[in-house]
Image: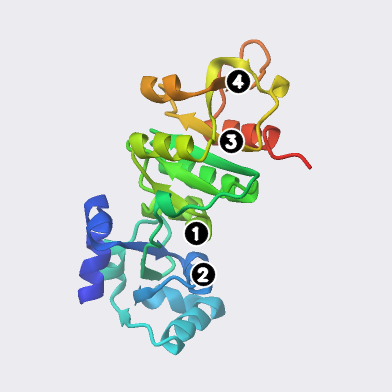
Amino acid sequence: MRILTLARDLTRRKARDRSGLFVAEGIRLVEELLASGLHVTGALTCDLIDRTPRGAALVAQLHGRGIDVVRVSEREFLSASDTESPQGVLAIAEKPVEALDALVLPAVARLLVLDGVQDPGNVGTLLRTAAALGVAATLVLPGTADPWNAKVVRSGVGIQFKHRTIDCTEEALLAFLSRHEVPLWGAAAAGRPIDGMVPPARLAIAMGNEGAGLKPSVRDACAALVALPMMPGVESLNVSVAAGIALYALRPRA
């Protein structure tokens, strides 16, 4: 029952940080995990997984990879599950080791900075949006939901398995950007209209907390503040929607 106990423990961020492990739950996410090349340390299944041929095939694939697969009762599985409609499979894997100092940027690059974005669904969508729009890496500042939270992994449909996602302090972020001559632009309601801005070849774009926006220290570090022009009466957009528009508008041009 070691895997069951570990899966329960990994619902806590402290356990994920301490162990370097995370949980991916559901058929599609476990399929994505197996395809990613990340090291899977174990899996948990129950009778729910046998309801579809796809589920049965996934269990066979887990066994075929030599992964330690533990079968438990549905009740035991639910005690470790983080979904409303469990499919009877979850896997435990090692988080990729990503260091900010090891990040190599091409001459033309975009970075996404998340500053205190707290909703797991928003963080997962932001990561997937960043990957879709060619962002080199997403840099996650303290106060942001853990990118390896099960809800974030599910919302991003496992994009963290492929897209570079790096936790860092504000000090480390600013030192990295300065060293690589990457200006930081921040999204803010009082910023300049984004459609009138000409972005540099390298650019980091910071998105702030859903309610409070950017922290004052991050805001002060920005070389420019940008805003999305909106119709009167509309005060704001969801942070992941706003980020998608901003990243598209500021994408590198040929």
Label 2 Cα neighbours within 10 Å, binned few <14 / some 14-19 / many ≥20: some
Report which residue position mark 4 lands on: 227
Residue 89 x %, y %: 40, 71
Judged left or right of residue 193, residue 6 is left
Q: Disc 4 and disc 2: Cα gap in Å?
A: 36 Å
Give, as a three-letter code, the residue at label 4: Ala
Q: Secondary structure at mark 1?
A: loop
Against 190, residue 176 (above or below) is below
Mark closer to the observer (1, 3): 3
Residue at 70 percent across and 26 percent down: it is 198
Looking at the image, tell me whether mark 1 or mark 4 is earlier in sequence order: 1
Mark closer to the observer (3, 2): 3
Report which residue position mark 1 lands on: 158
Q: Disc 3 and disc 2: Cα gap in Å?
A: 28 Å
Q: Secondary structure at mark 4?
A: strand
Give, as a three-letter code, the residue at label 3: Leu
Classify residue 212 by image quadrant. Answer: top left
Looking at the image, tell me whether mark 1 or mark 2 is earlier in sequence order: 2
Residue 132 x %, y %: 63, 50
Residue at 51 percent across and 71 percent down: it is 31
Against 101, residue 208 (above or below) is above
Report which residue position mark 2 lands on: 36
